[in-house]
Amino acid sequence: MNNFKEMYDGDMHRYGPNGIQRFCRKFSYYLRKTSSCKNKVLQKYYHLRFRLICNKHGIEISPYTRIGKGLYIGHPYNITINKNAILGKNVNIHKGVTIGQENRGTRKGTPTIGNEVWIGINSTIVGNITIGDDVLIAPNSYVNCNVPSHSIVIGNPCKIIPKDNATEHYINNLA
């Protein structure tokens, strides 16, 4: 796993020089410290602090979820991410997002999300699916199918619209 400083600095860069909220600094700090710390006692301390921040904001996410640098949480409320999901670099997540596991059928498992993906408010992504790079998932979308890179996803069931630079002007300050 990448070192703490690289991951934390990448996250902070995404918020820009004037946009760093207190929540974002603390959340990212303890997320990255918990997952990179080798000292078991310190790791437990960081994990406890991380849990307190998550509980305050209604966030269900494991600090051991594989998340690339440059994570951006637009509004930190009611977000659920399965611990086995994989998120790439420069992913934007907004309130009400669920990234979950499907327990049966051909899509049994959890999603893998690529780089530079924007996930809108109240979107749900479930199953053993792959979301490509440069994908915009519109608010209130339900995604349970593979999405190719350079696409916009809308609706329920999801409709995929190919588009070059799909996240242009949505994802800023790339880490």
Image (cartoon, helix red, strand yellow):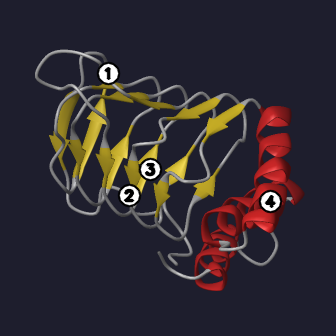
- Badge nearest the viewer, 2 or 3: 3
Dot label at residue 155: 1
Nearest the viewer among 170 and 145 is 145
Q: Is residue 134 above or below residue 17?
A: above
Relative side of 143 to 54, left or right? left
Location of mark 4 (residue): 46
Amino acid at the residue labelled 4: Tyr
Mark 2 secondary-structure assignment = loop
- Of callouts 1 and 2, the N-terminal one: 1
Mark 4 secondary-structure assignment = helix
Mark 3 secondary-structure assignment = strand
Dot label at residue 118: 3
Distance from Cα at disc 4 to Cα at disc 2: 33 Å
Amino acid at the residue labelled 3: Trp
- Badge nearest the viewer, 4 or 3: 4
Mark 2, residues whose alpha carbon is within 10 Å: few (<14), some, or many (≥20)?
many
Dot label at residue 167: 2
